[in-house]
Image: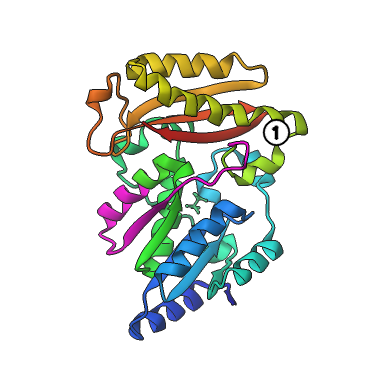
Amino acid sequence: MEIIRTVKGLAETADAMRRAGKSIGLVPTMGALHAGHKSLVDRARRENDVVIVSVFVNPTQFNNPDDLRTYPRTEEADCALLEACGVDYAFVPTPAEVYPEPDTRVFDLGPVAEVMEGAMRPGHFNGVAQIVSKLFAWAMPTRAYFGEKDFQQIAVIRRMVELEGFDLEIVPCPIVREDDGLALSSRNVRLSAEARSIAPQIHRILADSVDLKAQGYEAEEVERMVTDAINNIDGLEAEYYQIVDARTMQPVKKWAEAGDLGAAGCVTVYCGGVRLIDNIRY
Ligand code: PAF
C-alpha cells in the first residue's frame, strides 16, 4: 500500500488508474478505524480494481472545537489495518494540504440537511459536503462507500453529488455492531466502563420499536415511546429521536406518509457525556 500525502499525488494517481481503464473505489474516513470501516473497505475491495481510502479528520465539519481536538487520531494503526485489507492507496493529508485557504463554499443542501444533525450541529453538513466534494473531484472514483450509521449524511452526500454533477455511485453499507448491539463508532473508545455497559440499550430500544409498529402503533406514538424509553434509563439522554422518510429525511407522523424507501428512526443520545448516534429501518 502506498501512502499519498499530497492532493497532486492523489489526483495524478487516480487519473493514471482511470486512463488504464480501472474502476476506483473510494472510502472516505476520519481514521480511528474499526470493524465498521473495515466492512466498507472490504466491500470496496470486492467491487473495484483500485481502492483508495482517505484518512483525514476534517476540521470544517466540527462545530465544537473540543470535539475536534479530542477526536481520536491513530494514523499508524489505521495504515496497518488498511494495508492488511489490501488497500492500494491511503490518502493521508494535513489540514493545510486540503485547505490551503479557507473553503468558503456554501452548499444548497436543502431540506435533507435542515433536520436532526443539521439542526443540532449548524455547519456540520456543509463541512462534510466541502471535504467529500474535494475528495470526489480529486479522486473521481467510480464508487464511494459510506456507512449507514450516519444515515442522514448519506442523503446529504447524495444531494451534494446532484448539485455538483459528479458521475459516480454512492454505496451505502449496513451498520456493523458489537455482539451486544452497540453500533461501532470511533467515539466508543471515549465511553467509560459504566457508559459502555449502558450504551447497548440504545439499539435494544430501537430494535424493540420495530415490534411496536407491528403491534399497530403509529409513527408519532413510536417516536414518543422510544424517546421516553431512552430517557427512562439512567445514564442515557436522548438529544432527539425522529422517525423520518428514509429518502427525504422529513419527519413522518403516520407510517403511510413514508415514500418508496420506507421510514427510518434516527437517534442521538448522550451516554456518559459521549454523543452516540444510531438508527433503525421500519
Ligand atoms: O463519516 C465520516 O467519517 C466523515 O463525515 C466523512 C464522510 C469521512 C467526511 O469527513
Whole-percent x, y for residue 231 in the image: 57, 16
Label 1: which secondary element: helix
The residue where tag 1 is placed is 196
- Left or right, 225 with respect to 105, comes to right
Residue placed furthest toward the right: 193
- The residue located at (37%, 80%) in the rendering is 22
- Left or right, 45 with respect to 55, comes to left
On whether ligand 1 comes within 8 Å of the CB at mark 1, the answer is: no
Whole-percent x, y for residue 126 in the image: 41, 45
- The residue located at (30%, 30%) in the rendering is 250
- The residue located at (67%, 68%) in the rendering is 80
Of residues 128 and 168, the one nearer the viewer is: 168
Q: Give the range drawn in magenta.
A: 156-181
- Left or right, 263 with respect to 74, comes to left
Q: In this view, does 226 lie above or below 199?
A: above
Whole-percent x, y for residue 193 in the image: 76, 33
The N terminus lies in which quarter of the figure? bottom right
- The residue located at (49%, 18%) in the rendering is 227
As for residue 228 lying within the magenta part, the answer is no
**Residue type marked 1:** Arg
Question: What is the crowding at mark 1: few (fewer than 14 residues within 10 Å), some, or many (at least 20)?
Answer: some
Picture quadrant of residue 77: bottom right
Of residues 151 and 102, the one nearer the viewer is: 151
- Left or right, 92 with respect to 173, comes to right
The C terminus lies in which quarter of the figure? top left
Report the colour scheme. Answer: rainbow
Whole-percent x, y for residue 202 in the image: 56, 28
